[in-house]
Image (cartoon, rainbow, N blue to C red):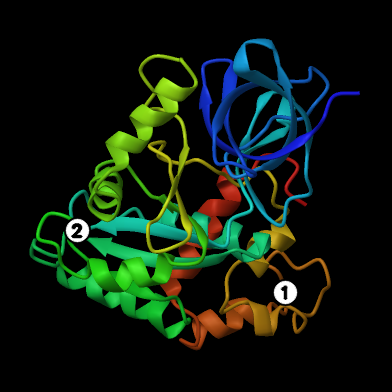
C-alpha cells in the first residue's frame, strides 16, 4: 500500500493541482482519484507519490469552512476551503456594487467565516453617498480598512488583520484586488514562478485561485475571479439570517414561514418602517431574493 503524505492544495494547474508537501515544503503536481470531490484551493489533502515526481490525491480531509459557487445541474462547487476570513474589496471607482457586497456578507454569515470590508483607492476622492452607506456596515460591526495600494495607505493595518489566518480577497472587477495582493506580497511573481517551475507546468495560469504564504504568518488566497461564490447554497431563511440586523428579529414575526416581503405581522418590515433597519439594505435583500435559484423556500 502506498504511503500517504499530507499536503495543502495551492493552485489548479490545467488538469492538475499544485500540492505543498506538509513534511518538507516541496510542491508536487497531483492528479485526483476519479471519484473524489473537486479539490479546492486551501484544502488539506492526503496524496501518494507516483512515478516522475508527481502525486495522486487520495482523500480530502474535513474542511472547517468552504466558499461555494454554482456548478452544473444545480449543484455547488467549493472554490476555497478552510478560510478564516473574507476581505471584500471595493472602491469609489468603479462605483461600489452594494448588492454584491451584501451577497458576500450573507454567504459569509452562513459559512461561519469572518468578513471585513476593504475600501481601496483612498488616494481618490470619496463620494458622499459612499460614506453614508459605509457607516451602516460599521454600525453592524463589520471591520473597515481604508487603504490605497497605489499610495501605500493603510497597508500595515490590513496586513496585521491577515497575520495568522487563511484569508481571501474578493470583490467586483477593477477595484484593485490584484494591486493589493502585489503590494502585500512583493515576491508574489517569484512564488508563482516557483509553483510553475517545480510542477513543470510552464507558465502559471492567472485565472485561478492561488494560495500564498505571508512572511509574517498566515495565508492569502488570490482569486482574480469577480463573484467566486453565489447564493446557490442558501435557503431563503439563511439569506435572512445573513443580515446581522435581521437576526434579533427572526423569531418575532407573526408566522414561522415569514419571508419578510409583504407578509402580515413581519417584525423585520416593521423595523424598516420605524427606521431601525436600513431601507437601502432591506431593498437589496429583496433584490437578492429575486437572484436566488428556485425553489427558494
**Image coordinates for residue 208, horizontal then vertical, percent:** 45, 30
Q: Earlier in the sequence, mark 1 or mark 2?
A: 2
**Image coordinates for residue 79, horizontal then vertical, percent:** 58, 38
Considering only vertical position in the picture, is 254 above or below 220? Answer: below
| Residue picked out by circle 2 | 92
The residue drawn where x is 23% and y is 57% is 91
The residue drawn where x is 21% and y is 48% is 94
**Image coordinates for residue 180, horizontal then vertical, percent:** 26, 52
**Image coordinates for residue 216, horizontal then vertical, percent:** 39, 64
Tag on residue 25? Answer: none
Asked whether residue 47 appears in the rendered view, the answer is: yes
SS at mark 2 in the image: loop
Q: Is residue 46 left or right of residue 176?
A: right
Q: Is residue 28 left or right of residue 222?
A: right
The residue nearer to you, when weighing 242 against 152, is 152
Tag on residue 264? Answer: 1
Q: Is residue 194 left or right of residue 183?
A: right
The residue nearer to you, when weighing 191 against 121, is 191
Q: Is residue 290 left or right of residue 145?
A: right
Considering only vertical position in the picture, is 253 above or below 156? Answer: below
SS at mark 1 in the image: loop
Asked whether residue 260 appears in the rendered view, the answer is: no
Tell me the crowding category of disc 2: few under 14, some 14 to 19, or many 20 or more residues within 10 angstroms, Cα based. some
The residue drawn where x is 58% and y is 70% is 243
Farthest top residue in view: 52
Farthest right residue in view: 1
The residue nearer to you, when weighing 26 against 150, is 26
The residue nearer to you, when weighing 171 against 28, is 28
Farthest front residue in view: 24
Mark 1 or 2: the one toward you: 2
Amino acid at each position: 500500500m502506498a504511503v500517504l503524505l499530507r499536503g495543502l492544495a495551492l493552485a489548479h494547474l490545467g488538469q492538475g493541482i499544485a500540492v505543498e508537501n506538509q513534511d518538507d515544503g516541496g510542491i508536487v503536481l497531483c492528479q485526483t482519484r476519479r471519484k473524489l470531490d473537486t479539490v479546492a484551493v486551501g484544502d488539506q489533502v492526503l496524496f501518494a507519490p507516483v512515478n516522475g515526481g508527481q502525486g495522486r490525491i487520495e482523500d480530502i480531509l474535513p474542511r472547517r469552512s468552504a466558499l461555494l459557487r454554482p456548478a452544473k445541474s444545480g449543484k455547488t462547487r467549493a472554490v476555497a476551503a478552510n478560510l478564516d476570513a473574507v476581505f471584500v474589496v471595493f472602491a469609489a471607482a468603479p462605483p461600489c456594487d452594494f448588492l454584491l457586497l451584501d451577497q458576500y456578507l450573507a454567504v459569509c454569515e452562513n459559512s461561519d467565516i469572518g468578513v471585513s470590508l476593504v475600501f481601496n483607492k483612498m488616494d481618490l476622492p470619496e463620494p458622499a453617498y459612499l460614506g453614508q452607506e459605509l457607516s451602516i456596515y460599521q454600525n453592524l460591526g463589520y471591520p473597515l480598512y481604508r487603504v490605497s495600494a497605489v499610495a501605500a495607505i493603510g497597508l500595515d493595518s490590513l496586513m496585521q488583520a491577515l497575520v495568522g489566518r487563511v484569508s481571501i480577497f474578493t470583490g467586483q472587477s477593477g477595484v484593485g484586488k490584484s494591486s493589493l495582493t502585489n503590494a502585500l506580497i512583493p515576491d508574489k511573481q517569484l512564488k508563482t514562478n516557483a509553483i510553475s517551475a517545480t510542477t513543470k507546468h510552464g507558465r502559471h495560469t492567472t485565472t485561478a485561485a492561488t494560495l500564498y504564504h505571508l512572511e509574517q504568518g498566515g495565508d492569502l488566497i488570490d482569486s482574480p475571479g469577480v463573484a467566486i461564490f453565489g447564493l446557490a447554497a442558501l435557503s431563503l431563511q439563511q439569506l435572512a439570517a445573513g443580515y446581522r440586523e435581521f437576526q434579533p428579529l427572526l423569531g418575532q414575526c407573526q408566522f414561522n414561514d415569514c419571508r419578510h416581503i409583504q407578509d402580515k405581522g413581519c417584525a423585520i418590515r416593521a423595523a424598516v418602517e420605524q427606521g431601525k433597519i436600513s431601507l437601502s439594505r432591506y431593498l437589496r435583500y429583496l433584490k437578492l431574493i429575486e437572484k436566488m435559484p428556485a425553489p427558494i423556500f
